[in-house]
Image (cartoon, rainbow, N blue to C red):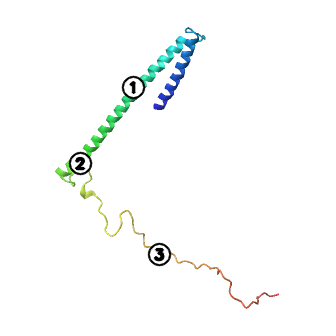
Amino acid sequence: MANKLKMANALLAKTSGKLAVMKSIDPKLDFSGGVSVTAFTKTTGDLKAAIDEATHYESELARVNVQIKQHSATARDLNARVLTGAATRFGRDSEQYKQLGGKRQSERKKPVKGKKAGKQAAPATPEPPATPQPTLSAAPAPTNGASKIDH
């Protein structure tokens, strides 16, 4: 919205400048086809009024957004305080606590001792035996210099 208002304000400035020039040439200048000082004056006035109204609504919207933010913070605080009040009066394992959105103590998942939460032990399945792979030696085998090539 702010971007549209900036564009409209820029257009208003441009239109007002042209209108001033048209009036300096001839206050009753008319190019026919609805293009005249009178039509330009009316359009410029209408644009100015619309921009002023939009600016008013924009500031009003900003005020209402602040109110929404404040009321939301109050509602979040009261939600937490209601749950705390129910826990204090009825206990964390009560049906009333659950009805108000709390999770009953007895329904909470109990942590497993000796294991980290979220991780499960891998199943104990034997892996297939590895097949030996031939290895390549980096250095050639020592010889006495004679090769075993048959001619």
Q: Is residue 30 left or right of residue 94?
A: right
Q: Quadrant of residue 57?
A: top left
Seen as rendered, the residue at the extreme top is 28
| Res 83 label | 2
Amino acid type of the residue that numbered disc 1 sits on in the rendered structure: His
Residue annotated with mark 3: 126
Towards the viewer: 129 or 65: 65
Question: Disc 2 vs disc 1: which is toward the camera?
Answer: 1
Quarter of the rendering occupied by the C terminus: bottom right
Q: Secondary structure at mark 2?
A: helix
First in residue order: circle 3 vs circle 1: 1
Q: Position of residue 117 (x, y in %)?
A: 35, 63
Q: Quadrant of residue 18?
A: top right
Residue annotated with mark 1: 56
Question: How far apart, in angstroms, are the residues tagged by discs 2 and 1?
Answer: 41 Å
The residue sitting at 39% across, 25% down in the picture is: 56
The residue sitting at 40% across, 29% down in the picture is: 58
Seen as rendered, the residue at the extreme front is 24
The answer to whether residue 36 shows anywhere in this view is no
First in residue order: circle 3 vs circle 2: 2
Amino acid type of the residue that numbered disc 3 sits on in the rendered structure: Pro
